[in-house]
Every structure is written in C-alpha cells, then in structure tokens.
Image (cartoon, rainbow, N blue to C red):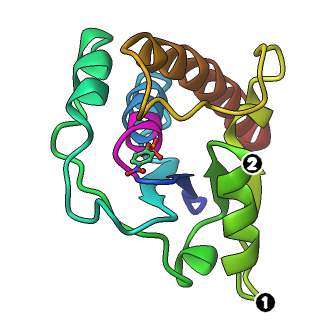
Amino acid sequence: MTEPLRVLFVCLGNICRSPTAEGVFRARAESAGLGDAVEIDSAGTGDWHVGSPPDIRAQVAAFARGVDIQSLRARQVTSEDFDRFDLVLAMDRSNLAQLEQARPAEARADLRLFLSFAPAAPVAEVPDPYYGERDGFQDVLDLIEAASDGLIADIQARRS
Ligand code: 4NP
C-alpha cells in the first residue's frame, strides 16, 4: 500500500481557519474515497489558544454545512511537523512567512498557501475572520471548500 499523504493546515490561532480546513478536507476526502490515503491535522503558529476547541462561530458555520469540528483542540506548530507532514498548507502569507522562518533547514515538508489549490478563487489568502462579522466565516468556508476540492483532485491525479 502507498503511504498516506500527510497534510497539515496552519493558521494563526488554530481555532478558526485551520480547524475548519481540517474538518472540511477530512469530510470531502472521505466522501471521495480517500479516507485512507490522507492523514490530516491542523495547528497554529501562535500559542494563545492551545488546548481550546474551535471558536464557536467556526463550529456553528461548519456544522451548518455538515461538518462537525467541535472535538478538535488547538495546538502550536512544532519543528517535528516539518518532517512528519508532506504538505504544510498556510491560510495566509503571514502564516506562510512564519512557517518558512520556523522550518528546519533539512526538513522535507512542502510549504504552500492552501488557496494555491483553488486557482479560480478571487483571493490568494483565507482572510482572518476572528475580529470580523459572522459573514467572514461563510467566506472562509467557501474558500476552504474550493481549495479542498482542488487538493482532492491533485491527490487523485498523483495516484492515477
Ligand atoms: P485563526 O483566527 O488564525 O483562523 O484561528 C485567529 C484566532 C485567534 C486570534 C487571531 C486569529 N487571536 O489573535 O487570538
């Protein structure tokens, strides 16, 4: 059997965007029959919310689209993550810059913006919804759904 592709989603706090991405991508990968082909996790570059469940607004918005993320708990990115994961997907350029700084020189992970898998999206970054209105979470979900489908198509192409 081929090794699973290990994917880590990263944002700032690991309570809004990256746990949403973890939940949405897991659900879509399972629906696509790729449940055993991927290992999925999420983390934050910051440590303020370590151990916390996702922001209640993110939980409610994801649940309304059929994705339950309430059991996830925030953690911070570690240097081991850059070896454990094949793909480390940043929500915005600030997250990506932090990851590039933290990445050990010999680490093998491929670091990218998550929305590189959604080339038709109107933006290149998943905007931080933490200080905004509820609609921000709908935008986050729209972008994450599109990039999840793009990533699934990419994985299917690699495997065929
Ligand atoms: P996230 O959102 O990076 O999508 O989880 C944020 C959560 C918390 C904070 C900022 C962004 N914060 O400043 O505490």
SS of the residue under disc 2: helix
Q: Residue furthest left?
A: 71
Q: For the point 20% across and 48% down, which residue is it?
A: 53
**Left or right position of 81 against 154:** left
Report x, y in % for residue 159. Answer: 72, 42
SS of the residue under disc 1: loop
Identify the residue position indicated by label 1 in the image. 106
**Number of numbered discs visible in the structure rendering:** 2
Report x, y in % for residue 122. Answer: 78, 13
In the rendered view, tell whether residue 91 sits above or below residue 88.
above
Identify the residue position indicated by label 2 in the image. 93
Q: Quadrant of residue 110?
A: bottom right
In the rendered view, tell whether residue 100 sits above or below residue 18.
below
Instruction: Tell me the kind of residue under disc 2.
Output: Arg
Q: For the point 68% across and 43% down, which residue is it?
A: 92
Instruction: Tell me the kind of residue under disc 1.
Output: Glu
Q: Which residues are magenta?
A: 14-21
- In front: mark 2 or mark 1? 2
Estimate the spatial distance between the alpha carbons at disc 2 and disc 1, rounded to whole Å.
22 Å
Judged by its main secondary structure, the magenta piece is: helix
**Left or right position of 73 against 3:** left
Q: Are marks 2 and 1 in contact (CB under 8 Å)?
A: no
Q: For the point 75% across and 48% down, which residue is it?
A: 93
Crowding at label 2, few (<14), some or many (≥20) Cα neighbours within 10 Å? some
Whether label 2 lies within 8 Å of ligand 1 gets the answer no
On the rendered image, what quadrant is the N terminus found in?
bottom right
